[in-house]
Structure formats: structure tokens, C-alpha cells
Image (spheres, grey):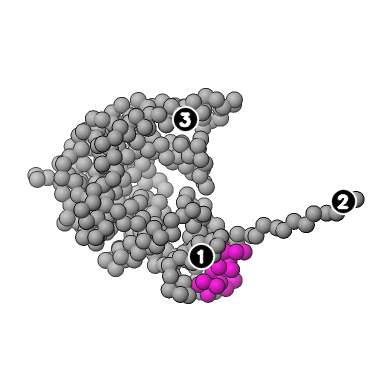
Amino acid sequence: MPTPTAHTAAPDPATELGALLETAYDLDGVRLTRLPAGQNTINYRADDAGGVLFVKHYLPGTDLAAEREAIGQSRLAGEHGVPVAVPRPTRTGGTIATTDQLAVSVWEWMPGRTVEDGLTPGQQEAAGRTLGLLHTAFADHPAAAGGESRRLAKWRTTDPAAKATATVDQLLDSIADRPTPDSFDTEAVRTLTERRAALGHLPGLIAGLPDGMTTQVLHGDYSAVNLHFDGDTLTGVLDFLPPAPELIAYELGRIAFDPRTVVHDPDWIGAGVRLVDAYRRANPHHTAADTTGCARIALIQLTTSLYGVKDHYLKPGLLQDDLDAFWLLRHEAATRLLDQLPDVEQALAEAAGPQ
């Protein structure tokens, strides 16, 4: 009779995570609950006798130096009155604790919740005002000195439509090779075919961008999923990115014409203008081009992005069902923005007044 082979059980990630929290943060016996949010980190709610904390578990290969820079951005914004989560320092005063297998940061638990179906008028005001405050705080950030938006330079010096079209064709070929298409495959074929046609508008959209747009350091990912609200009060701005020069109009257009607003709000143009007006009042450093060009920037970004559907067929994400739904939402938003861009830009220009 053969001798049974001994197998060593793989370490339990939750056990290892709990041990790291104890040794690095003096958090003994915390109860961890995984949260159904986050595509680039695994996130947990941590309960212990001292209260509730937020734990961010970084995936293997994460650039931890960049993550530490991002945490520094959050702290800087907080010093200027932006409501941000406060990172809990490790025993040695660091912001990220590591072992050979794990890397985590721990944060205070922020009040409020994310809004998933479009911001209310009061929330739009708060989001615009807070973004204006944040951009004012970062206006002189040294990381943007002499820099330009890599995104804008890429749009103007390469052929983004050709690259995106090639990826669309690759995805359509992949779907055609599937023996039994499912319901998402059917939707993907429809939306990718529509997107392929929309990409033909890119050269004109890029050529129509206004001159004089401001480049500076931004939040980097100022979107609805990274904002916490309690009613109409914005209680937390989360998940900053490392400092890099980028267009004000990119970040402003992205939140003013958030896909949830564009798809779910019957008066989405008015909603976007409302947010931009609140931003304009809070940031004295903006130019007219920053506000009047923000919808066009948002449309170009949406049109060139295949986020969600590309992941589905090439490299599924942590929460791929969410990404599938987000692709469909963003595609619908891009379609509406393209169809009504002249009306949107006229409304933004009228709101800005004589320049």
C-alpha cells in the first residue's frame, strides 16, 4: 500500500492579513469582512474594540512607492480642507505595512456612502465645489512644473482611433469564436459595433479641443465611486493617484458628465452644468477653456476607452460582473454625449458668460 503523501495546506490569506495587522498596527483580533468594491485592491472592513477601520490589501506587483505618493496626496488635500480619509500609521510611522507576501494600508472608516445611480442636485454642487477646492490646493504642486498632459499629447500625436478600432476588432473576433454566445456576448457585439462607428468621430473631436486648457496635478480618479456622501454633504474623497500633470478639464468633465448622471438623469446636461458652475466658483485658477471644453474631453476619453468589455474577454477583473455593467453604462453615456455634444457645449458656454 503506498505511503500517503504529506501536503502542507496553503496559508490562509485572512489569517496572514490578521497577523500583519497585529504586528504592524497593534490591531489584535480584528474581524475582517471583505467588501464588494475595488478592482485594483482587495478591501476589507475591520472591526475591533476600538471601532471600525478600512483595510486596503494591495495586489501582487503593485507599485508601492507610487501608492505611498498617492497617500501623501490625500494628506495634502486634507490639509487644505478637503474631506479625506486619514491613514493610520504603522508602528514605525509608515503608511504601508509589508511582508514577503502582503502589503496593506489601514484607514479611518469614512462616514456616508457612494452614490450608484447619479448625484442629486445638492450632491452635484458639493462635488463641484470640493473639486474646485482640491484643484486650488494642488495648483502650485511641483510635480506639474513644466509638464504637459500625457493624455492630451497622446491624442494629438498618435492615432487613438486606429488603436481602439484594432482592439474592437480583436474582441469581436474573440466573440465570434465562442461556440455558444451568452447574453453579454450579444450585448458586447452590439455595443462594440456601435463603438467602432463612433471612433470615426475622434479626429474631429480632438481637432475641436480649445486652446488654453490648464494642466496641473489633480486627484487623478475623481469619480462617483471615490466620493462618499451623507445626504447632500460630501463626507469623503478617496483613492487619490500619485501626482502627475493632467488637464483640469479631464477631471472636471469626468465627474460633471459621469455616466450615471448622463444615463439616469433626464436633465443630465443641466446637472453637468450645475456641477461645473459650483467648480468655477470654488477655483479661481481655471480658464474658460477648462470649463467649456470639459464635456468634449469626457467624450473623447469615453470613446477611446474599452474598460470593462476588454477586461471581460482578455483579462477578467476581480469583480467582472460589475465591470460588464459599467461598460454598458459608459457606452450608453458616450452615445448620448456624442449625439448631443453641440447642445452640451452651448450650455457650458452660456453658463460661463462673456469671456
Task: Report the amino acid beneath label 3.
Answer: Leu
Q: Position of residue 23 (x, y in %)?
A: 55, 72
Residue that label 3 marks: 171
How far apart in space, not on screen, are marks 3 and 1 (Cα)? 38 Å
Name the residue that disc number 2 marks: 2
Image quadrant for the C terminus?
Answer: top left
Residue farthest to the left?
354
Residue located at (24% from left, 60% from top): 142
User: What x and y, as percent, mark residue 233?
Assistant: 33, 59
Q: Nearer the viewer, mark 2 or mark 3?
A: 2
Q: Residue at x 56, y 60 (%)?
A: 101
Query: Mark 3 vs mark 1: which is more N-terminal?
Result: 1
Magenta-tinted stretch = 15-33
Q: Is residue 321 visible?
A: no
Residue occupying image coordinates x 36% and y 55%: 241
Where is residue 115 shown, x and y percent of the image? 40, 51
Q: Label for residue 98?
A: 1
Amino acid type assigned to the residue bearing label 1 in the image = Thr
Evaluate if marks 1 and 2 touch, with contact meaning CB atoms under 8 Å apart: no
Badge 3, how many Cα within 10 Å: few under 14, some, many 20+?
A: many
SS assignment at label 3: helix
Q: Is residue 125 above or below residue 353?
A: below
Q: Which mark is residue 273?
A: none
Q: Residue at x 35, y 51 (%)?
A: 221
From the viewer's side, name the closer residue of 112 and 136. Answer: 136
Asked which secondary structure carries label 1, the reply is: strand
In the image, what residue type sits under mark 2?
Pro
